[in-house]
Amino acid sequence: MSNPGKPFSYRKLSTVTSIKHEDTVKSYIGFLEKAYLFFILPFFDYSIKKQAANKKKIYPADTSFTRFSGTLFSEERGRLLETIVCNHIVSKGYNVFYWKDEKGREVDFVVCDGLKPIRLIQVAETIDNAKVWKRETESLLRARAVFGTIDSIILTNNSQEISKVEGITVKPVLDWLLEN
């Protein structure tokens, strides 16, 4: 709960929780997911085998799980935004994945119709910092090169709407939620 959107493996969770079998951890996580308490995002790949082999990301179904877990730091506010966006996308019935390339450039959400990517979404509390802007746009541009030019958006908490930059739309998360 205190690490929404961070990659995890069942093996690592079994070690951290002192549960002897990773299959038991996998079952418990599955129960929580079936109860709609968490959403599991697999790594996007056209190969189901590669999806299963890669780490997954987990998001709570409610931001209060993270807010009141007692371990949220101010720099993690972007993860709360990610959680809100994830919940919204899932509520619309899309298949949702994350993606990362060999250099560690990551796209928060690959929204798919079936297994066909239709939108790439990055979430950042702010993009006013040049380093953050570069990180977010480079990840999207790399993913667009891999998947083909598809709809790409950066959602922010405190930046004004900017028209498309390099084919990427930048929009306040609240405006995006109200439109969708």
Image (cartoon, grey):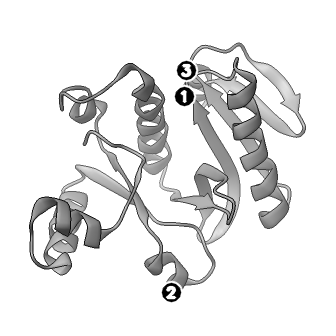
**Is 103 in front, or is 70?**
103
Give the foreground label among 2 and 1.
2
Residue labelled with disc 3: 174
Q: CA distance from mark 3 to mark 2?
A: 36 Å
- Few, some or many C-alpha atoms within 10 Å of disc 2 (few <14, some 14-19, many ≥20)? few
Say whether residue 123 is left or right of residue 105: left
Above or below, comparing residue 28 to residue 141 in the picture? below
Above or below, comparing residue 61 to residue 115 in the picture? above
Residue labelled with disc 2: 49
- Few, some or many C-alpha atoms within 10 Å of disc 3 (few <14, some 14-19, many ≥20)? some
Query: In the displayed image of the protein, which residue is found farthest to the bottom?
Result: 49
Residue drawn 27% across the image and 66% down it: 12
The N terminus lies in quadrant: top left
Tag 1 and tag 3, C-beta contact below 8 Å: yes
Residue drawn 58% across the image and 30% down it: 124
Residue 113: give x, y in percent of width and height.
Answer: 62, 64
Q: CA distance from mark 2 to mark 1?
A: 33 Å
Say whether residue 57 is left or right of residue 46: left
Say whether residue 84 is left or right of residue 137: left
